[in-house]
Image (tube, rainbow, N blue to C red):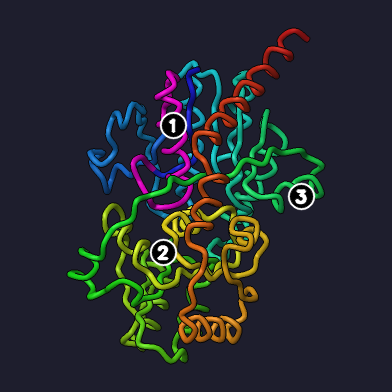
Amino acid sequence: MKIAMIGHKKLPSREGGIEVVVEELAVRMVQEGHQVDAYDRWEPVLRNGKDIPKRYKGIRGIKIPTFRNKSMNAFVYSIFASIRVLFGRYDVIHYHAEGPCAMMWLPKLFGIPVVATIHGLDWQRAKWGGFATKYLLLGEKCAVRFADEMIVLSHEMKRYFKETYGRESIYVRNGVSIPSGAEADLIAREFGLHKQEYILYLGRLVPEKGIHYLLEAFRDVKTEKKLVIAGNIDKTEYVSMICREAEKDSRVIMTNFVQGRMLEELFSNCFLYVLPSEVEGMAISLLEAMSYGAHCLLSDIDENKEAAEDHADYFANGDVKMLRKKLQELVDADAAYDVEGQKQFVAARYDWKKINSETLDIYQRAIQKKTVRKKR
């Protein structure tokens, strides 16, 4: 098959879970003999394009110009990408996330099979303003109406689309690879961090991730352990607020964006991984933390509980007092947990090879629907 991927930022990138998913799927599809084009976002005024390779692990990167402004970025990108994709002679186009799905009607108008993956109900996320929220809702409705097949990442989202729109969707999990782990080397030299001596949050620094709850709760936890906040320190009002709060506690370390060996070391050596999010699809960072054998403390939203089941501790979503209590209990007890059982759970449930196979089957079903339409 000739396949187009639309909706991520760029490849390679770890800016968010969508980028990880697109890369993991596309690489495996190429290895199986399919041709995959990734429609990458490109800001021509600010970048020279060298950071977007023409080919990456067999995936062809196609640069789509857009704006740096976050509220307009996905809007402009999805328009240009959906026009450009019409000339690619694709067997199937795979849209990722609600925003880009707003233009899904265009290739569908030309008879090209389209698949949507809804990674989360993005309009619920606190960072968006009025226009962006309306645009994301439009994307959601377009996915419901025009997608030949629609993929969701949780049973909660599957119920949502059935109850709200009467639309059936297909539940396909995200995946993760089981790593070997890494000793605390770079993190020791760069940040003075050693094994079991810090609590970790690793992910995007946005309001719906609940980092402000974690900082407030940690402030009154009696411990010499550090709190590491690993994520891209960009120029947003929320990140500025997070940085100001972090400066009030000498135990808090803000690392900025991490990847590669640094990321491996942070996951491998943390005492506890905390995900206090209010909204999730299926958090890649959570699956990665579990794959490294990290003890996890999560907000009790359905998506987190579905992802980790009984292989994590939980606190009530948004409840700072309960989060503080849980942190103190875990620090004081320093109790052992079933690391190997957790890794086995992750390996069996979140296998990229199986998920890739399921996705290719979904493409074939979408293509078959086109064949049926032509016969009619």
Asked if residue 141 is positioned above or below residue 220 in the image, the reply reads above
Judge from the rendering whether residue 234 lies leftward or rightward of residue 277; answer left or right: left
Residue at horizontal 64 percent and vertical 44 percent from the top? 152
Distance from label 2 to label 3 (Cα)? 29 Å
Depth check, front residue: 112 or 291: 291
Q: Where does residue 314 sit, x and y in percent of width and height? A: 61, 72
Residue sitting at 41 percent across and 54 percent down?
69
Q: Is residue 85 left or right of residue 197?
A: right
Q: Which mark is residue 202?
A: 2
Residue under label 3: 159
Q: CA distance from mark 2 to mark 1?
A: 24 Å
Q: Quadrant of residue 94?
A: top right
Q: Amino acid at mark 3?
A: Arg
**Circles 2 and 1 in contact, beta carbons < 8 Å:** no
At 25% across and 42% down in the image, what residue appears?
51
Q: Amino acid at mark 2?
A: Leu
